[in-house]
Image: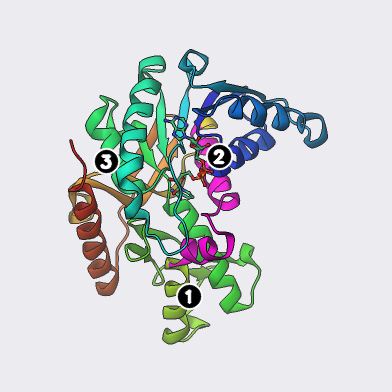
Amino acid sequence: MKVTVVGAGAVGASCAEYIAIKNFAAEVVILDIKEGYAEGKAMDLMQCASLNGFDTKIVGSTNDYTKTANSDICVITSGIPRKPGMTREELIGINAGIVKSVSASLVEHSPNTIIIVVSNPMDTMTYLVHKTTDLPKHRIIGMGGALDSARFKYRLAEALEAPISDVDGMVIGGHSDKGMVPLTSHATRNSIKVSEFLSEERLEQVAADTKVGGATLTKLLGTSAWYAPGAAVSGLVQAIACDQKKIFPCSTLLDGEYGLSDLCIGVPVVLGRNGIERIVDVPLSAAEKEHMAESAEGVKKTNGLLEL
Ligand SMILES: NC(=O)c1ccc[n+]([C@@H]2O[C@H](COP(=O)([O-])OP(=O)(O)OC[C@H]3O[C@@H](n4cnc5c(N)ncnc54)[C@H](O)[C@@H]3O)[C@@H](O)[C@H]2O)c1
């Protein structure tokens, strides 16, 4: 299993580190446009190998795509992150050009790869990869919902005063402050609906805190977060690499599912060796359906800014 991570910045390096620590990949290539940067991160991470007990080989590359050749999975984290007060949508001007050229170079050297898009605005960047490469739709995956769901579970555990391992929940919809749809109607504490423990008001607060999860961290850190994004990507990579058939909410091209078409947006999918193996249809409450439709409108509006 060979994995390439483009962008050796905060998220890319965290992602490479978590993949290496989980010890399922033979090789991780980190590529960045900044001279020597990816090589430096790769060397630093390799010097963790004996300390953390992994055998994954980590290689750095300054924009040399021959080193990425025949990657099974490629992760795109290259591009600018938001600063406090910015929305993810505001990044489109710079990131669209980067994601378009990076995905073309990746596919040229790894025509059979599966691409995981992380750069923001992620749903629109995933759609851009669909429009500009000839990869089949099950091999283009946007990562946002896995992170948003982790943030949802964090907020649920906080409200329930319960350990996170007792809590389950999922966020679908667009990966944006307004577009996320935390599925409170499906969230459980050890298989009991969370609405048995929390008032409607408290659940609304949990959903609201989840939706601004990224913005809250950006305000505290001065840039966007990286540990949980890296961990979330590594979860998707592992599910594909190890053919786990696990369900994650991922951004994928819809063709009628959830009543939506011609956009990429977060829905539950089964991830295995072929990438997205199935889209899972879950029943939504009336309010969740309405939020999903509004979310899709927002994503389509951002897609309209792409110069295709
Ligand atoms: N989808 C998500 O859930 C999620 C979560 C966190 C961050 N993000 C996004 O991920 C992206 C990266 O965030 P970060 O905090 O790691 O930023 P960062 O600035 O730390 O790293 C980005 C890296 O990309 C590199 N880069 C720029 N253009 C490149 C190119 N053409 N080829 C190769 N490398 C190039 C830069 O040199 C830099 O090292 C941002 O767009 C951010 O908004 C998404």
User: Closer to the camera, 306 or 4?
Assistant: 306
The numbered mark, 1 or 3, whose residue comes first in the sequence reads: 3
Question: Does the stretch in magenta take in 217?
Answer: yes
The numbered mark, 1 or 2, whose residue comes first in the sequence reads: 2
The image shows residue 197 at horizontal and vertical percentages of 53, 82
Three-letter code, disc 2: Gly
Here the colouring is rainbow
Give SS at disc 2: loop
Mark 1 → mark 2, Cα distance in angstroms: 30 Å
Query: Does any atom of ligand 1 lie closer than 8 Å to the CB of label 1?
Result: no
Tell me if residue 207 comes above or below residue 45 in the rendering.
below
Q: Main secondary structure of the magenta part?
A: helix
Three-letter code, disc 3: Tyr
The image shows residue 112 at horizontal and vertical percentages of 38, 19
**Mark 1 or mark 2: which is in front?**
2
The numbered mark, 2 or 3, whose residue comes first in the sequence reads: 2
Residue at 54 percent across and 70 percent down: it is 155
Residue range highlighted in magenta? 212-240
Mark 1 → mark 3, Cα distance in angstroms: 29 Å
The image shows residue 75 at horizontal and vertical percentages of 46, 34
Q: Which residue lies furthest to the right in this view?
A: 51
Q: Give the labeled residue for mark 3.
A: 127
Question: Does the stretch in magenta take in 54?
Answer: no
Q: Give the labeled residue for mark 1.
A: 206
Query: Does any atom of ligand 1 lie closer than 8 Å to the CB of label 2?
Result: yes
Which disc, if any, is residue 9? 2
Tell me if residue 191 comes above or below residue 248 in the rendering.
below
